[in-house]
Image: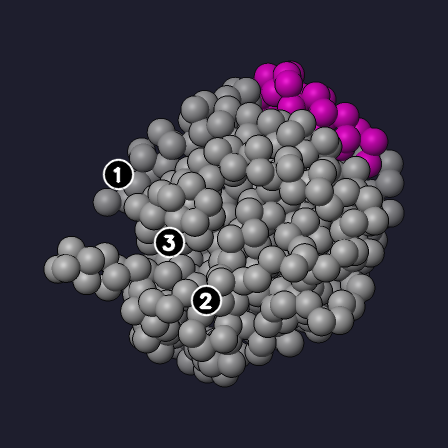
Amino acid sequence: MAQLIETLDKLLWGWPLIITLLGTHIFMTVRTGFVQKEVFRAIRLSVTKEEGSKGDVSQFGALTAALSSTIGTGNIIGVGTAITMGGPGAVFWMWVTGLLGMATKYAETLIACRYRVRSEDGSIIGGAMYALERGLHMKWLGIVFAFLASVCAFGIGNMVQANAVSVNIQENFSVSPWLVALLLSILTGVVIVGGIASIAKLTEKLVPLMAGLYIFGCIAILIMNHETVLPAFISILTGALHPESIAGGMGGYALSVTLRYGFARGLFSNESGMGSAPLVACAAKTKNPKRQALVSMTGTFWDTVVICLLTGTVLVSCMIQNPESMNLVNGAALSSSAFGLIPYIGKPILIFGLITFAFSTILGWYYYGERSAVYLFGEKVIRIYRILWIIGVAVGAMVQIDIVWNLADLLNGLMAVPNMIAVLLLSGEIALLTKRYAGSHIEDEDHTEIPLIHNSTTGVIHSLKSNRQK
């Protein structure tokens, strides 16, 4: 099974998907008139309160909930893995996925908010499945996306993250995995039982703290390695297009491998094109879809353009500063070696970052998976999904699950396909809405009513069965 998943993963993450992702990012950048130029305005909007807007949580709450799932082990271990497997040039391609992927994150959030609905319990839900169903009348593809998202969540957002927490606590504090599994399961259950309101309330405080401490640690290392920062940038740029001749004495890499790991780990980190972040963005209180789409776009900016670039520069500079670290073939070991340079507080910052990043990812991805499961089976599935989620956390914390990393990569790629179809086929509407809410009009109220879906308690699967019986 492990060999089969690894083979399928390599096939999926070959040139076809790389070109499709990069092509979508470039196309949406052009189609939206280079929406990335509005990033600083979007940052301002993300911390601006709105009165009288429709939604369940604040825009900042929705953003931090989404960031809680994107700022995770991919920012630390994922970047290290990309470098050890694809060379320093992989950092550049990760950064490219972030810079260009901001347009795709904007586009997928815009259509998700445009076609969001209100369920019978009063909550607002949306995502690629509703854009596919209501915008393109492709309910079958919406079902495919929802199924992949609800299953994918157990890989990328559950067991992988729980395992990262367990391994770090076990290695640094000699705590039994069984105890870690118990405590982590209890903490997860306490938070997710309150739904998006509870998750957003925690992430609003946790995300700025954990990201701020991690960025502080990265800057401290770069100051200590100031002599190798410029050579690190040169190695990253050189390795991006000519990986076979990297400066600094590092070994050569095939361009296809550098691209593969750069794009795969970049998507794993910022999730642009996957359609995951819009699942929580749709719950935000917002006046119009463009406003929330801009706010959601800043998540990719912070995650990849800032944090992943900082991490990559830190790791490459340390590899040049300490040539023995070039022999490290494990992303976690490479990160540990780098932060070990900071006396006394380096390792604690890394450990705190890994644990909090992973735990927050568990919370954010729970909501993604739950919303997708609700689309398929209705609100009655929530209790079952919560139980399964907590069990998944416990299992991930107790067992070695190397196979899950490849499975997560595979499901990530599959999940992106229906979402990108929705983005590309609705690109005309995306461009139209972008122009409609241009300039000061983004502050205007959108009077479009959010429709009530009467069969939301039954779910799509039950609805399809009922229609077939009729």
Q: Amino acid at mark 3?
A: Ala
Q: Indicate left or right for 350 with 442 as reference.
A: left
> What residue is shown at x 52% (from left), y 37% (from top)?
426
Q: Quadrant of the N terminus?
A: top left
Instruction: Specify which label sits upstream in the sequence, 3 or 2.
Output: 3
Which label was assigned to residue 355?
none
Q: Which residues are magenta?
A: 229-252
Q: Residues within 10 Å of mark 3 (few under 14, many from 20)?
A: many
Q: Secondary structure at mark 3?
A: helix
Q: Quadrant of residue 347?
A: bottom right
Residue 325 place in picture, x, y as percent: 64, 40
For the residue pair 242 and 41, the one nearer the viewer reads as 41
**Distance CA(mark 3)–CA(mark 2):** 19 Å
> What residue is shown at x 83% (from left), y 49% (from top)?
440
> What residue is shown at x 37% (from left), y 53% (from top)?
146
Q: Which residue is mark 3?
A: 146
Q: Residues within 10 Å of mark 1 (few under 14, many from 20)?
A: few
Q: Which residue is mark 2?
A: 452
Q: Quadrant of the C terminus?
A: bottom left
Which label was assigned to residue 4?
1
